[in-house]
Image (cartoon, grey):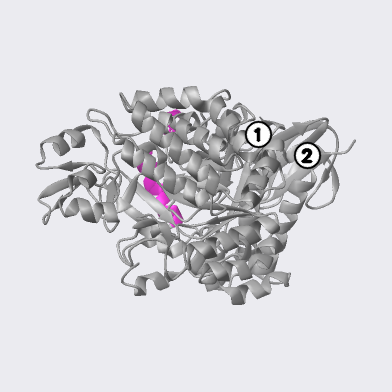
Amino acid sequence: MTKQEQFKERFKRHYDELKWLYCELYEGGETEFQKLCAMLETQSAKRSKALKALDEKRLAHPDWYRQNDIAGMMMYTDAFAKTLKGIREKLDYIEDCGVNCLHLMPLLDSPERDNDGGYAVSDFRKVRKDLGTMDDLAGLADECHNRGICLCLDFVMNHTSQEHEWARRARAGEKEYQDRYFFYDNYDIPAQFERTCPQVFPTTAPGNFTWLEDAGKFVMTTFYPYQWDLNYWNPAVFHAMTENLLNLTNQGIDIIRIDAVPYIWKQLGTNCRNLPQVHNIVRMLRMITEIVCPGVLLLGEVVMEPVKVVPYFGTVEKPECHMLYNVTTMATTWHTVATKNTTLLKRQMEIVSGLPKEYVFLNYLRCHDDIGWGLEYDWLKNQSVSEVPHKQFLSSYFTGGFYGSPARGELYNDDPTSGDARLCGTTASLCGVEAAAEQKDSEQLALAVACDLMLHGYMLTQSGIPMLYSGDEIGQLNDYGYKDDEKKAADSRYLHRGPFLWENAKLRKDPETVQGKLFAGIGNMLHIRKSHDVFLNTASVSTRETCDPCVLCLVRERNGEKLLALFNFAPTERTAWISEDGMYQDLLSRETIRAKDVPMPPYGIRWMLLVK
């Protein structure tokens, strides 16, 4: 069967559903739908032989991304290696980290100012000039594929920069381009939206609309005034953005991270979040990638409460995203660090473990963004935890304001009234490495390193794909230099986006240094993880009662292999009061022990494998 015949076969399989969903969104859209079909065929023809061969290889092994040998690392190109060519030159280091999935933060063309860290895109077909070119991106993808590394890139669907060509033409009065956004002559309709649509940044960017003095109109700006929301009621927007997405996959991008998925459909009288039309669009994108580039994955960024996250997987029969961020577990992990109480974490592990094994979460401790406190407060209320005071406690703890806290972080978009605030900081600084180093306290430093390793071990124990943040493998600390840069000073997220310190990376082989301890510890756990099938996504996962709220016990089982994973979230010695039959080998300490009343060192972790 030729490549063209394979394309047509895939198209035939999805055609009816794709057409039905499209015409449901765009009534009477038969003609427009045919234009979409023609565009998909054109993009398929542009896909290189090498990428089509990679598609075929992955189609032959559809579970390739559900294995236990995949580990990711996210980074800003300029912070890590200045340019895309620089990244290519540093791939040996990436491999040395045990990483085979590289997530590059936004690198498409964006304004020098008002760029939201690259999430205000001014041209979806160009790489930011100081980072390189599209040819550089394609070259990096080729080299990654040669080394067995897959490449992930953000795709910002919800909005464009106000500097985008569409926005400039809309601002100049061209109706065709105003219709690609939400433009209004007066505040009547915006006022109706504001009644039901929450504000994302009520402190720093209040409201959902911005008045354009030169155009004499209001435009919808859910996030920041310089990010104009796209109007997906207009099929021209869906067509153009889908083509932009496919252009990226044809450069060799393996994973498309869809930014701010829940927000992409707006409708009066609603909160403009998680509307049914959003799921229609994501389902269409899933089918379109399966038709044109079937080896490509969709990663959804859904920063919502758990009940609203899972639906973005779709169903097993009609899937949407291949993967989703495990936002809830990430936030609850840090809540557990502060409270030393694993009860909520245990509950969430039980919920996640009950989901279909086809669902793949991307697990992480932190990312380029802030950490929000979207916890299960309805459930916590039954544990005598009140939402506003608890958020205030967490903010105080992780900024070092709470007595005895070793954490060093900063707040982003702090709203004292609601208690809402988002946390910024590197993993090492939030674990106490920064404070201990400043105080030259070797005992506290040892505890901070232990906490850091324990958290990474917990992340690696979860089913799904673990994602490190560049610098965490060597314990990189907060970078306060952003405050001296007027372009960054107002955004505390740059605290944990500092330049990668290559001088510190040279210390990673020295076991006496913080860098050496973390690099070796994380690398060892990554190696163990991919060496045992019990870490596969298909393993069953359950919890055990430890009779100590500081200690969490997860049990992973697959084909007779059984792993007891224990985590002590306290800085003191504890005991996991469990009782399991048989003898176990701790894969980390190499000691053989019984799984009964297991002693746990401060911030200790044990991966205990049943000895057959």
- Quadrant where the image shows the C terminus: top right
Q: Is residue 602 left or right of residue 311?
A: right
The image position of residue 456, as x and y in percent, is 63, 52
Disc 2: which residue: 533
- Residue at the image position 23 percent from the left and 56 percent from the top: 168
Q: Is residue 75 visible?
A: yes
- Residue at the image position 29 percent from the left and 36 percent from the top: 234
- Quadrant where the image shows the N terminus: top right
At mark 2, the secondary structure is: helix
Please, what is the three-letter code of the amino acid marked with disc 1?
A: Cys
Q: Is residue 448 left or right of residue 133?
A: right
The quarter of the displayed image where residue 359 is located: top right
The quarter of the displayed image where residue 11 is located: top right
Camera-side mark, 1 or 2:
2
Cα gap from disc 1 to disc 2, whole angstroms: 29 Å
Disc 1: which residue: 547
Camera-nearest residue between 1 and 144: 1
Camera-nearest residue between 475 and 377: 475
Compared with 380, 445 (above or below) is: below
| Magenta-drawn stretch, dominant element (helix, strand or loop) | helix
Q: Is residue 504 left or right of residue 524?
A: left
Can you tell which mark lies on residue 328? none
The image position of residue 258, as x and y in percent, is 45, 44
The image position of residue 609, as x and y in percent, is 81, 40
Q: Is residue 371 left or right of residue 171?
A: right
Q: Is residue 207 visible?
A: no
Q: In the rendered structure, which segment of residues is drawn in magenta?
A: 375-398
The quarter of the displayed image where residue 442 is located: bottom right
User: Which one is earlier in the sequence, the residue at label 1 or at label 2?
Assistant: 2
